[in-house]
Structures are given as C-alpha cells and as structure tokens.
C-alpha cells in the first residue's frame, strides 16, 4: 500500500498501558479508545496499536473498535506484530519488530494492499525492510528516550540523515525522543514523518501537534 507523502507523516504509537487483566469494560481500554478517536479527529495519519500484554481476544476487540473510528477517514490503523488479528479485524496493516515474522513472509501472506511498517535501528535493517517489501520503516532511537534505552545510545540526526539519503525515496520515519522542538531537525534530515508515543500522548493536544508538524 502506497503512503501519502504529500505532508509529513504523523505516526501515533499507543503506550502499552493495558495489561493481561484489561477487558473492554475496564478504564484503560476506554482511555485508549478515547485517544484513538481524538487522533482520527486530529488527522493523525498512522496509528499503531502497541498493546503487547493484551490477550488475543481483547486485542481483536480493541482493533475492531478502532477500525470503526478510522473507517472513512484518512487515518490508517496498524497492529503491532499480529498481522493475523489486523486482517481479521479489518485494520490496514501491521507493524513488525525484530521478533516478528520477516517482512517477506508477511507480505507474501497478506498481499500488496496490506500496509507493513518495520522497526529498524541500522541502515542494514532499513535496507532489508525495504527489499523485503515493507511500505516504510521507523528508525531510531534518534534522541534520548527512556522507552528505547534497551537499544543503546541515541543514533542521532547524522545517522538518520545517512539512512534517509541511502534509501530515498523509501519512507523513513524518525522515532525516539521526538518532540515539537526537534521535529523540524528530523524532517530536515530527510525523515518522511515522525513516530512516537510521548509526542502524541495527550489527546487534548493532538490537534496542535499535528498543526505544528504540518507547518514545518
């Protein structure tokens, strides 16, 4: 599936605050749906459901309800890792990690209309994602961020620029410590858009964030 690259891509990743005890009737489930609804209303282009602790049944229900918000809008919905649940619930695609099935296998089983994003941390991983049929790659962490400390030191803007230049026109999204203040630097480095949890965390602030990013 081809991405709309006419403006910087905004990619909201949910914060993974749900647990194995979450059900469709618990408050955390409701808060997540509220964020998704606000993101669609604000014009966020991509949303990833990154709720790794949910049971398959509850993740399917969450995806199904999120699809109801995104249908008829410009927002595309992806599910972290679980291409099977994404397809069953009618989501637009999947986001793959280092522990997921390969992009090549997922593409072969889902077809060309299924959106595939891939998390990458090096130019080699980004090249592999592109060559195996991904639609875009997320690259990071670009800046210091608590959620990405397991991946080592920040890669920085220089490395981001090297990857975007080497893979152009393949879309690379900046991830990791991205803020309103450093977003312009990421886009000047060649990023096709911005991905994050913290950047899009407050549902009441999403419209402002999207407006600022589009104005860069």
Image (cartoon, rainbow, N blue to C red):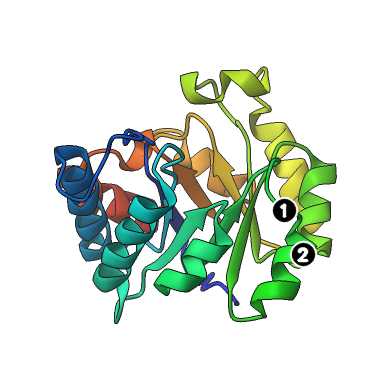
Q: In this view, does 88 lie to the left or right of 42?
A: right
Which residue position holds label 2?
A: 105
Viewport quadrant of the N terminus: bottom right
Residue 101 badge: 1
Residue 136 in picture, x, y percent from top left: 64, 60
**Mark 1 falls on what kind of element?**
loop
Residue located at (46% from left, 35% from top): 178
Separation of residues labelled 2 and 1 (CA atoms):
7 Å
The residue lying at 78 percent from left, 42 percent from top is: 162
Is the C-beta separation of discs 2 and 1 under 8 Å?
Answer: yes
Identity of the residue drawn at 32% across and 67% down = 64
In-image side of 93 versus 162 (left or right): left
Up/down of 13 relative to 61, above or below = above
Please count the marks in the image. Answer: 2
Does residue 91 appear in this view? Answer: no
Residue 20 seen by the camera: yes
Q: In this view, does 204 lie above or below 57?
A: above
Q: Residue at x 70, y 65 (%)?
A: 106
Q: Could you say where residue 180 lies in the image, as x and y percent from the top left? A: 37, 38
Q: In this view, does 187 lie to the left or right of 27?
A: right
User: Splitting the image into 4 quarters, where does residue 124 fall?
Assistant: top right
Disc marking residue 43: none
Report x, y in % for residue 135.
65, 66
Residue 151 lies left or right of residue 29; in this view the side is: right
Label 2, secondary structure: give it: helix
Within-10-Å neighbours for mark 1: few <14, some 14–19, many 20+: few
Camera-nearest residue between 75 and 23: 23
> x%, y% of residue 58?
33, 52
Determine whether 65 is above or below 80 in the image. below
């Amino acid at each position: 599936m081809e991405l709309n690259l006419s403006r910087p891509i905004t990619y909201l990743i949910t914060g993974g605050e749900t647990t194995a005890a979450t059900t469709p009737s618990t408050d955390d489930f409701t808060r997540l749906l509220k964020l998704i609804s606000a993101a669609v209303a604000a014009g966020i282009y991509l949303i990833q459901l990154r709720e790794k602790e949910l049971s398959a049944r509850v993740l399917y229900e969450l995806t199904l309800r999120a699809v109801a918000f995104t249908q008829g809008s410009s927002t595309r919905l992806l599910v972290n890792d679980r291409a099977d649940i994404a397809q069953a619930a009618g989501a637009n695609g999947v986001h793959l990690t280092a522990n997921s099935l390969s992009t090549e296998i997922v593409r072969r089983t889902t077809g060309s209309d299924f959106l595939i994003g891939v998390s990458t941390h090096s130019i080699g991983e980004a090249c592999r994602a592109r060559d195996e049929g991904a639609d875009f790659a997320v690259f990071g962490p670009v800046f210091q961020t608590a959620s990405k400390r397991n991946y080592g030191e920040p890669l920085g803007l220089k490395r981001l620029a090297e990857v975007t230049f080497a893979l152009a026109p393949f879309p690379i999204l900046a991830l990791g410590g991205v803020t309103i203040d450093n977003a312009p630097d990421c886009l000047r480095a060649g990023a096709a858009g911005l991905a994050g949890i913290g950047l899009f965390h407050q549902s009441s602030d999403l419209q402002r964030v999207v407006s600022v990013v589009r104005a860069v």
